Amino acid sequence: MPPDRTAGDGLSSTGPNLVEERVASVLLSEDEVQARVRELGQAISRDFADSDTLFLVGVLKGAFVFMSDLGREISRAGGPAVRYEFVRASTYGSDVKASGEVTRNVALDGIPEQIEGQDVLLVEDILDQGFTLAHIRKALLNEGKARSVKLCVLLNKVLNAPTPQVARQRACLQLDYQGFTVGDRWVAGYGLDAAEDFRELPYIAVVREEYYVGT
Ligand code: IMP
Ligand code: MG
């Protein structure tokens, strides 16, 4: 990350004081994010050229900004018609995660019945320990009866010290599409939050975790 870029660089945001206080640095600028989402849209359009309709299933809340842009980039690239569906997953509550976890309960709301027999692209904001994606993929196949489920994440977090269980879990999750790899820090913006802050930022920032631990 370029150390000279800070959150005070005239970047638009609501709540500028909160950004100045709690954002450490800008990790990915709005232009970088948009350019990469465009590339992903082009790749997905090529790969699904033979499909009439592609079902995007986004994980709420974090994926909603990414997925809305992704659908438009698929359209711009001449790809298949897109259907937007969502599942609601709660993994961490409002907290920044604890380290060294062995497992995490994932609660899932509302598997869309429209996906039965369809090819699905599961769209997620970030892959961290992998509990969320593994759980949802299984549910879309088993309960939702999707024909196939491919994985698309904007950010793939490279973990410093995963537990053996987490390392195994992540090894089972081959990503079909990923935007960027990021380091093992809490990031927010472009749909991702820190205790509900910063989803509205058009860029992705590293958050000062000390403000959020234990919230
Ligand atoms: P996993 O189950 O450990 O892979 O957790 C994935 C979920 O945790 C994502 O869907 C996010 O909602 C959340 N998450 C993990 N890391 C971050 C982060 O750095 N910023 C914001 N949300 C995150
Ligand atoms: Mg999420």
Image (cartoon, helix red, strand yellow):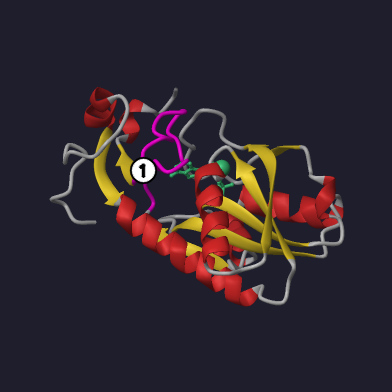
Residue occupying the point 68% across, 43% down: 86
- The quarter of the picture where the N terminus appears is bottom left
Residue occupying the point 72% across, 77% down: 50
Where does the image place residue 106, in percent across and percent down from the top left?
68, 40
Q: Quadrant of residue 105?
A: top right
Where does the image place residue 55, in percent across and percent down from the top left?
71, 57
Q: How many marks?
A: 1
Q: Which residues are magenta?
A: 184-203
Q: Residues within 10 Å of mark 1 (few under 14, many from 20)?
A: many
Residue 76 belongs to magenta span: no
Q: Which residue matches tag 1?
A: 202
| Front in this rendered view, residue 82 or 194 | 82
- Residue 120 appears in the picture as rendered: yes
* Direction from residue 39 to residue 153 in the image, left or right: right
Residue occupying the point 86% across, 61% down: 117
- Residue 106 appears in the picture as rendered: no
- Name the chief secondary structure element in magenta: loop
Vertical arrangement, residue 156 with respect to residue 87, above or below? below
- The quarter of the picture where the C terminus appears is top left
Vertical arrangement, residue 75 with respect to residue 194, above or below? below
| Front in this rendered view, residue 189 or 131 | 189
Where does the image place residue 186, in percent across and percent down from the top left?
39, 42
Asked if disc 1 is less than 8 Å from ligand 1, the answer is no
- Find ligand 2 in the image and state its quadrant: top right
Residue 200 belongs to magenta span: yes
* Direction from residue 24 to residue 87 in the image, left or right: right
Q: Quadrant of residue 64?
A: top right
Q: Amino acid at mark 1?
A: Pro
> Residue placed farthest to the left in the image?
4
Badge 1 marks a residue whose secondary structure is loop
